[in-house]
Amino acid sequence: MRRTRPMLDPAGVKNMKQLIDLRWIAVIGQIITIVFTQWVFHIPLPVELMIGILSSLIGLNLLSLFRWYTLPSASNLELMTGFLIDVGALTALLYLSGGATNPFVFLYPLQLALAAVLLASWSTWTLVGITSICFAGLTRFYVPLQLPAGGVEQLFDLHIIGMWICFVLDAVLLIVFMSRINRNLRERDANLAGMRQRAAEEDHIVRMGLLASGAAHELGTPLATLAVTLNDWRRMPQFKNDPEMLQEIGELQHELDRCKTIVSGILMSSGEARGGSIVVTNASDFVIDLVREWSSSRNSKALKYGRFAGEDCRIVSDSALKQIISNVLDNAAEVSPEWVKLTATHADGMFTITVRDRGPGFTPEILENLGKPYQSTKGKVGGGLGLFLVMNIVRKLGGSMSAENGEEGGAIVTLQMPMDALSMEDEDVGHIWV
């Protein structure tokens, strides 16, 4: 069976995309500033050099669109490199437009605030040191602004206006991008919490599998002893000549054979006795065999099954796959012993099994905690593991399980599994449990 790939943390790439968006805003804002300074306030600037720097940022962003929008993750070093590029471009533009006297020098703290959230501690402090050096350098080395005649009197007013614009930009961009970044980080934390929960559940399943395998081994000897005893009883005159006793012995033999089948299934699912555990068959034949085996082993005529809907195809039939579907059928038959309906379909690459019953349905608490262990309405100690096991096995196949109450009463449980996960692979056939 194919296994699903581990989920990758997308928060790094999402944060890198935020930096790309911030760079677009910075480029647009800097172009507008250059236009106003050059042609509205008539302060000459080295426009060619400044446009060259901005063109480099535009080219970097265009390349980033093809790179970061296709990668699964971004490292701390890659994020830091993006910050350093932005700091370098800002320093170059400030150098060409008055250095530290330019009010837009206070865009440095915006970079540092974002870095404090996104980068590792050492990276943030490294960026603090670099920006401090850049700021200090701009106090000594820069291209002075060539003010027009009479512009000295307006210099203070222009500086105040520039500081106000810089403040508004810092405040707005900080709020917008910090909110986005915090959302990304919350999503990452939620994904990590989900992965931890899934790992804990899978560990619980492994421990249960080990216990079940050990119990199956231990049961082998007493079951064999019972089989020998029943065969001896069949030949004893006091039982052989009593039809009623022979019938009861036959029923005991049937139940014993069922116990042996269950034990063999546990051993096969745990990786032992592999020779008979995997069968390549059609999806429709798999469902028909499942229905026949379940009805026969439970001596039940309650299960209703029509025909397989959708395109038939070859799949790998594993004993554990039958077991999880049988588990759902057992739960349905327990609350609705007179009528249980199973439907099977193949559509859009998904193999779907739906089980309906006419029981009381699920309680809101069960639906809310579907798939969690020990969630049961039967009041049994240790109960509620059936759907927990089913959900985790289906999830390992890349599928899903859902449950709801029918409009006319009863419960509906739906299992959806990718047909690719059930199909034969080239020289790679494994067990669901592995």
Image (cartoon, grey):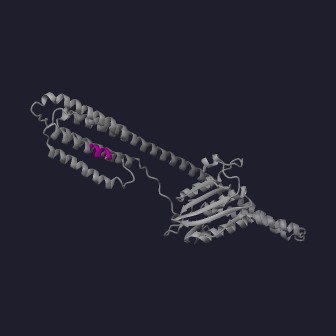
Is residue 415 inside the magenta stretch?
no
338 is higher (above) or lower (below) than 314: above
Residue at the left extreme, as displayed: 149
What is the x, y in percent for residue 292?
A: 69, 69
Numbered disc total: 0
- The answer to whether residue 279 of the structure is visible from this angle is no
Side of 429 where 108 appears, left or right: left
For the stretch drawn in magenta, the main secondary structure is helix
Foreground residue among 401 and 384? 401
Query: For residue 393, what is the image quadrant?
Result: bottom right
- The answer to whether residue 385 of the structure is visible from this angle is yes
What is the x, y in percent for residue 63?
A: 28, 54
Query: For residue 246, what is the image quadrant?
Result: bottom right
Q: Quadrant of the C terminus?
A: bottom right
Query: For residue 325, what is the image quadrant?
Result: bottom right
Foreground residue among 306 and 100? 306
What is the x, y in percent for residue 277?
A: 61, 67
* First to last magenta residue range: 21-26
What is the x, y in percent for residue 87?
A: 26, 41
206 is higher (above) or lower (below) than 346: above
